[in-house]
Image (spheres, rainbow, N blue to C red):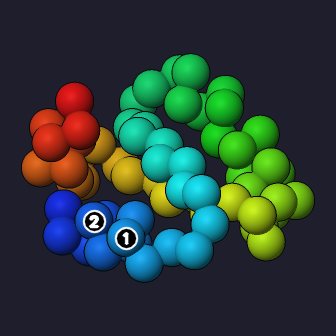
Amino acid sequence: MKLDELRRQLKSSTKPVLVEFWAPWCGPCKTMAPYLEKVSAEFKEQVKLIRVNVDESAEVAKEYG
């Protein structure tokens, strides 16, 4: 994901957005992923989940610390 795409999605969303920064090698990320997906599916009308792979989107990860 590119930084401007994330910003566009954040600005255009009409509902709260949860941005998850994750990495394939991250143990806690792997543990949390199924729960976040379940909650995202259950509350898809109320909340938007955006997952950002920090290895593939280093610019975005750097911008958001």
Give whichever of 40, 9 is nearer the camera: 9
**What is the C-alpha distance between the residues marked 1 and 2?**
6 Å
Give coordinates of residue 13: x percent, y percent.
51, 73
Q: Position of residue 62 (x, y in %)?
A: 14, 37
Q: Amino acid at mark 2?
A: Arg
Q: Quadrant of the N terminus?
A: bottom left
Label 2: state its secondary structure: helix
- In this view, the residue farthest toward the top is 28
Q: Is residue 65 above or below residue 12?
A: above
Q: Would you identify the image quadrant in which residue 7 lies?
A: bottom left
Does residue 11 appear left or right of residue 29 in this picture? left
Quadrant where the C terminus is found in the figure: top left
Which amino acid is tagged 1? Lys
Q: Residue at x 79, y 71 (%)?
A: 45
Say whether residue 6 is left or right of residue 50: left
Quarter residue 41 falls in: bottom right
Q: Secondary structure at mark 1?
A: helix
Q: Nearer the viewer, residue 43 or 2?
A: 43
> Which is more foreground, mark 1 or mark 2?
1
CA neighbours of label 1 inside 10 A, class few (<14), some (14 to 19), many (20+): few
Mark 2 — residue? Answer: 7
Tell me the residue that label 1 is attached to: 11
Relative to 24, is 48 on the left or the right? Answer: right
